[in-house]
């Protein structure tokens, strides 16, 4: 199934200069980059994006982190892109991430884990809508 998903290089990844490396992995895999921008996420957008975690003890910390520096927002398109991009990232906790995945290769903590990816078609549509206008997807 041809899918679109929302991927993001989080502030830790941008700060550490991993943008080109991560985009290279995405393109080598064969996904099309249909939307791309570096931005600082407005607080309201971050709170909406992470709405499902609102009651978690780390919610404030998560929003502070994700708004604390520029991110790279990416709209990806490809066959099975939602699960495929999550497989490329590896598990949320880098300690459990598969060898060769982005989080296994570049992250050490669950809070600063370099990348994000939508977890379902519904999340992908919602998150793409939060970060991109329709005319920004090419
Ligand atoms: P992500 O899956 O992109 O979206 C939810 C985020 O919450 C997750 O990445 C982690 O970065 C973050 N998160 C999960 N558990 C914790 C935790 N215990 N402390 C801080 N952040 C966390």
Image: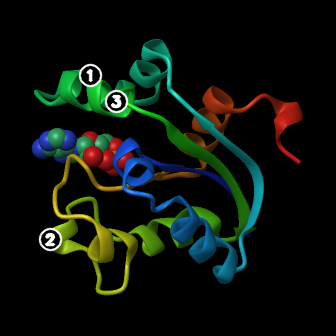
Instruction: Please provide percent x and percent y for residue 76.
Output: 69, 58
Label 1 sits on a secondary structure element that is loop
Nearest to N terminus: mark 1 or mark 2: 1
Label 3: few (<14), some or many (≥20) within 10 Å? few
Where residue 93 sits: x, y (%)? 20, 61
Q: Which residue is mark 2?
A: 95
Camera-nearest label, 3 or 2: 2
Judged from the image, the secondary structure of the residue bearing numbered disc 3 is helix
**What label does residue 106 carry, if any?**
none
Q: Nearer the viewer, mark 1 or mark 2?
A: 2
Asked if marks 3 and 1 touch (Cβ < 8 Å), the reply is yes
Which residue corresponds to the image point at 39% horizontal and 42% vertical from the top-left? 11
Q: Is residue 110 left or right of residue 57?
A: right
Alpha carbon distance from label 3 to label 1: 6 Å
The disc label shown at residue 52, or none? 3
Figure quadrant of the N terminus: bottom right
Q: From the viewer's perspective, is 13 left or right of 92? A: right
Quadrant of ligand 1: it is top left
Compute the Cα span from label 3 to label 2: 23 Å
Label 1: which residue?
54
Q: Residue furthest bottom?
A: 99
């Amino acid at each position: 199934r041809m899918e679109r998903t929302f991927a993001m290089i989080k502030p830790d990844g941008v700060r550490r200069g991993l943008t080109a490396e991560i985009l290279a992995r995405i393109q080598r895999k064969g996904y099309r980059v249909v939307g791309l921008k570096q931005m600082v996420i407005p607080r309201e957008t971050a709170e909406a994006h992470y709405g499902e975690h609102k009651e978690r003890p780390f919610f404030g910390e998560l929003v502070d982190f994700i708004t604390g520096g520029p991110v790279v927002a990416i709209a990806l398109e490809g066959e099975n892109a939602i699960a495929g991009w999550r497989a490329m990232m590896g598990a949320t906790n880098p300690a459990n991430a598969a060898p060769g995945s982005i989080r296994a290769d570049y992250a050490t903590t669950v809070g600063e884990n370099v990348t994000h990816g939508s977890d379902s078609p519904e999340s992908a549509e919602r998150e793409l809508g939060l970060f991109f206008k329709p005319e920004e997807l090419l």
